[in-house]
Amino acid sequence: MSEHIHYVTDDTFDAEVLGSPLPVLVDYWADWCAPCKALAPILDEIADGYSSRLRIAKLNIDENPRVTASFGIRGIPTLMLFKDGGLVATKVGLLPKSQLISFIDSNI
């Protein structure tokens, strides 16, 4: 796994995501989610290439119900891009690397 992937929790979300000086892509996931597992290596590759422009964070929905509920997460994987403390874009479902890069580039 990339050293540029950060794990966040209900307790650290506000500081690490909303308070980040860089845009943050949050991956809402769970251990039992096969598409989430398929997305993980794609995020690892992207994290290394975008480390100076974007943070990538992962939030386990089973272990962090407060943030999960506050953003209305109903399906996973869900990717949310936060910039300047606010939500700017959302994608639900497994994306190929090229579509994920387009999503990030068009929103940061």
Image (cartoon, rainbow, N blue to C red):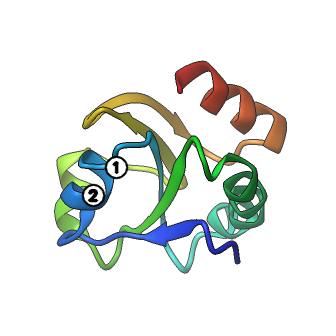
Q: Where is residue 26 in the image (x, y as percent from the top left)?
A: 45, 52
Is residue 32 shown left or right of residue 82?
A: right
Amino acid type of the residue tagged 2 in the rendering: Thr
N-term-proximal mark, 1 vs 2: 2
Residue drawn at x 57%, y 67% is 5
What secondary structure is marked by label 2? helix
Q: In which quarter of the image is residue 77?
A: bottom right
What secondary structure is marked by label 1? loop
Q: How crowded is mark 1: few (under 14 residues within 10 Å), some or many (20 or more)?
A: some
Task: Report which residue position mark 1 lands on.
Answer: 73
Residue drawn at x 23%, y 69% is 12
Is residue 103 shown left or right of residue 45?
A: left
Q: Do the residues labelled 1 and 2 touch (CB within 8 Å)?
A: yes
Residue drawn at x 67%, y 46% is 50
The label shown at residue 49 is none
Q: Position of residue 11 (x, y in %)?
A: 17, 72
Q: In which quarter of the image is residue 60?
A: bottom left
Is residue 7 shown left or right of residue 1?
A: left
Instruction: In the rendered view, tell whether residue 88 sits above or below residue 41.
Output: above
Give the CA distance from mark 1 to mark 2.
5 Å
Q: Where is residue 96 in the image (x, y as percent from the top left)?
A: 80, 42
Q: How crowded is mark 2: few (under 14 residues within 10 Å), some or many (20 or more)?
A: some
| Most foreground residue, 2 or 39 | 2
Q: How many labels does the image show?
A: 2
Q: Where is residue 86 in the image (x, y as percent from the top left)?
A: 26, 32
Residue drawn at x 69%, y 65% is 40
Amino acid type of the residue tagged 1 in the rendering: Ile
Q: Quadrant of residue 89?
A: top left
The N terminus: image quadrant: bottom right
The label shown at residue 68 is 2
Is residue 62 shown left or right of residue 22?
A: left
